[in-house]
Image: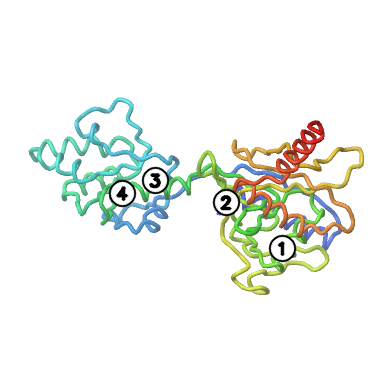
Amino acid sequence: MDSGVVAFFLLKWYNIFERAFCNTVIFQSKQEVQLKTTVTLSKLAEDLDLRNLTPEIDMTTIELTTQEINRPALQLAGYYEHFSHERVQIIGYVEYTYIISKEEEEQHDCFEKFISSGIPCVIFTTLTEPTEDMRNLANQYKVPVLISERTTSSFMVEIIRYLGGELAPRISMHGVLVDVYGEGVLITGESGIGKSEAALELVRRGHRLVSDDVVIIRKVSEAVLIGSAPDVTKHLIELRGIGIIDVRMLYGVEHVKDSQEIDLVIKLEDWNKEREYDRLGLEEQTTEILGNKVLCHSIPIRPGRNLAVIVETAAVNHRQKKMGYNAAHELYRRVQENLMNKKGV
C-alpha cells in the first residue's frame, strides 16, 4: 500500500483510539492526500504472467514511473537522440530478427549499447528469446529480461492498459463511494454529517458499498475517474456509537464492490437559511477532481430528510439525463408552451 495512505490511516485511527482512551485529540487528517504512483517490476511481471530469464536480478527494487512503452527499433539501428530510457522496452519479432541478422560481434555491440543505456527492463514477445550473449549482457548491466508468450500487438495493448491503471494520477479523499443503480456516487461532507449512515441505508436498499471514510481515486483518462477502497478498510463502515461493521459479512458479497467509476458527487452540508439552494436543476454545478470535472449536487441537511432516498433519486435522475431526458428542461418547455398558448388566446 502507498505510504501516503498508510500515514493517513495511522493518523486517523490514532485519533480515534486517543479519543477513546485519553479523550483528547492530537492530530487531524487531511481531507485530500496526493499519492505517489509507481509500480515495481516484480508486480508487473507477476500480474502479466511474464517469464523471468534473469532471476539473479532483484526486480522488487526496480520501480516503473511512466505509462509509456517503447519498441527500440531506431535505438538498435544506432539512433539514440530523444530516447526515453525510463520506459519499458519491448522487443518484438521485427527487432529480434534485425539483431540476429547481424554478425556476432555486431550483435554484441548493438545489444550492449542498448542494454547499458539505463533502461528498467527488456521484454521479448512473439515467442522470441534472447541469445546467451544477450542474457550475459543483461546480467552484467543488471537489466531484467522477461518473456511474454503473446504476440507483440496483443501484449502492447495489455501492458498499456495495465500501466495506465497502475500509474494513473491518484489521490485519497475523505468521503464515501457507493454504486447506486450502476452510477458511482461519491458522498462528501464534514465528519459526522451522516455520510456513513446514508451509505449503510443505501446498502440495505440493495446498492453496493465501494469505500467508506477514505476513497482512493485514480484518473485513468481525461474523462474517467475510478474510486476504490484502501485494503485496510475494504468492505468496512464506521458508525459513531456502534463502531466498525463489515458490510460483506453482514449483508453478503452482493452488497460490496472493489472499484467503481465516479459519475456524480453529492456534497452534504448543514442547512444554511441564508443560502439559495438549487430548486429546479437547470444549472448544473461541477467539482474538479484530478483535473476532471464531475457533476456535483450540494444537499442541505435538516432533521427528517431521508438522505438515502435523496442520493438514490439523484443517481437515477443523473442516469436519466445521460439517456437524454432532463425533467427541469421539460418543465421549462411546458411553461414556455403554456405562455405561448396564452398569448395566442
Whole-number angstrom distance, CA of label 2 to CA of label 3: 19 Å
Q: Give the residue type that dot 2 points to.
A: Glu
For marks 2 and 1, the one nearer the N-term is: 1
Q: Which residue is mark 3?
A: 160
Q: Which residue is mark 2?
A: 261
Q: Give the residue type that dot 4 points to.
A: Pro
Point 71% across, 69% down: residue: 204
Q: Which residue is mark 4?
A: 144
Q: Give the residue type that dot 3 points to.
A: Ile
In this view, the residue in front, 50 or 277, is 277
The residue most toward the front is 345
Q: Does the residue at mark 1 contact the one at mark 4 (Cβ under 8 Å)?
A: no
Left or right, 242 with reference to 247: right
Q: Which residue is mark 1?
A: 202
> Residue 42 appears in which quarter of the rendering?
bottom left
Left or right, 78 with reference to 237: left
> Residue 316 appears in which quarter of the rendering?
bottom right
Label 2: few (<14), some (14–19) or many (≥20) C-alpha neighbours in 10 Å: many
Left or right, 28 with reference to 53: right
Whole-number angstrom distance, CA of label 3 to CA of label 4: 19 Å
Whole-number angstrom distance, CA of label 1 to CA of label 4: 48 Å
For marks 2 and 3, the one nearer the N-term is: 3
Q: Quick one: SS at disc 1?
A: helix
Q: Give the residue type that dot 1 points to.
A: Leu
For marks 1 and 4, the one nearer the N-term is: 4
Whole-number angstrom distance, CA of label 2 to CA of label 4: 35 Å
Q: Quick one: SS at disc 2?
A: strand
